Amino acid sequence: MNRTDPRYQAYVHILQEELLPAMGCTEPIAVAYAAALARDILGAVPTKMEVRVSGNILKNVKSVIVPNTGHMRGIPAAAAAGALAGDAQKELEVIASVTKEQQQEIHSFLESHPVEVGLADTDQIFYIDVRAIKDSDVGRAVLSGYHTNVVLKEKNGRVLFQKDENAAQEESPYNEKDLLSVEGIVDFADSVEIEDIREIVQRQIDYNFAIAEEGLKGNYGANIGSVLLHNYGDDVKIRAKAYAAAGSDARMNGCELPVVIVSGSGNQGITASVPVVVYAKELAVSHDKLLRAVALSDLVTIHQKSGIGRLSAYCGAISAGCGAGAGIAYLYGGGYREIAHTVVNALAINSGVVCDGAKASCAAKIASGVDAGILGYWMYRDGNQFRGGDGIVSKGVENTIHNVGRLARDGMKETDKEIIQIMLG
């Protein structure tokens, strides 16, 4: 694939759009971002806040620690952090620079000022509506579709900015993700001019491996990475799972290091990159080969998620673990055939793992997703595979990816509603 191929520029642009730095779990950070916007619109620190969100936002913010808040959890903490200390210009790093003094102000605010939280009356899966109130003045900001997509700014009922909520999708010159295919992604990984992706992929490697190492050093969440290394040994297959899980445990449980996200998710960004880095170290491949393999893993992950959607009842770590398996296959010298079979095998193993919000158990699901990716590759290397007609597997990798997207997007809608009801008690 050369630079004149429309797919080439689309794939580079997709990586540029997707590999973004974020501080903390992206759903509470999006709440903080909306709150910072609402405060800016209000023009003052609010004395009251009202937050209305879709069920999937409620699910993904309920149990996760919001960074730079002194280990507070949930929507009120995220909204207060954004309103009191957020820098809306930084978007998903909106509360990356909160001081200790501001943390105390956030605590004090929550003790003495109401933050009302409720479900929004919307069909949008991703929806955040924050009103910042002082006296008779109200600043309002609404995000819809994805984490930084502002669809409404309003002050005292007067619209300052608005765009169609139902068209709230990532804006590209055309629908670039329709150009993704496993065959095209492998071709791109083989032929991309490395300087076109070096900076963005290197940042992902640096950020995400750093938080993985911190997760193994510290005491975060359920310490899944440490449990794996202690009980399963120091084999590369275990290290790949352990480092990815440790990065998630740190991120879900208050570590204040940034990550680079994929498909709007830090956990997916970690899962798609860290296992590939672990294998690259083990195999002593060139650094450019590592960059190509991580880019391939990212694009395979994004390809799957484009059919599923940003948020659903389907655990995104499974998509990213499959991407990591594809990246590892590439490090071993695999081409399209090996990578396609790895993807199909991995999807057949673990599709259907449910997402019940962001919290410590995400790390264990990541370990399972990475394990499926690795097993999918070694199955094929040993002459074994799942075939069309085996459950949701159809002949051809693209058909199987399509089936999983259909399962996650359409088939699991009621599952998602039930999960949210269970979490609401």
Image (cartoon, rainbow, N blue to C red):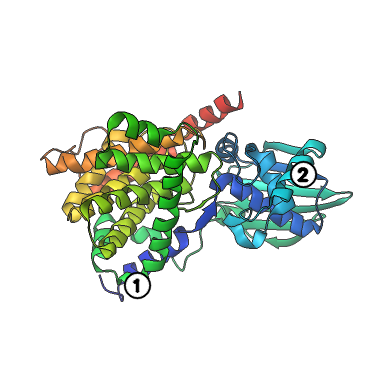
Residue 383 position by quadrant: top left
Residue with the most extreme front position: 217
Residue with the mark numbered 2: 49
The answer to whether 105 appears left or right of 251 in the picture is: right
Q: Which mark is residue 111?
A: none
Callout 2, which amino acid?
Answer: Met
Residue with the most extreme bottom position: 4
Residue 373 position by quadrant: top left
Q: Is residue 21 above or below residue 79?
A: below
Q: Image point 53% across, 31% down: which residue?
A: 417
Q: Image point 36% across, 67% down: which residue?
A: 198
Quadrant including the N terminus: bottom left
- Does dot 2 land on a helix, a strand or a loop? strand
Q: Is residue 61 visible?
A: yes
- Per the model, the C-alpha gap separating discs 1 and 2 is 46 Å
Q: Is residue 351 visible?
A: no
Q: Is residue 11 above or below residue 317?
A: below
- Does dot 1 land on a helix, a strand or a loop? helix
Q: Nearer the viewer, mark 1 or mark 2?
A: 1
Residue with the mark numbered 1: 195
Q: Residues within 10 Å of mark 2 (few under 14, many from 20)?
A: many
The spot of residue 183 in percent (x, y) is 24, 58
The spot of residue 413 in percent (x, y) is 48, 35
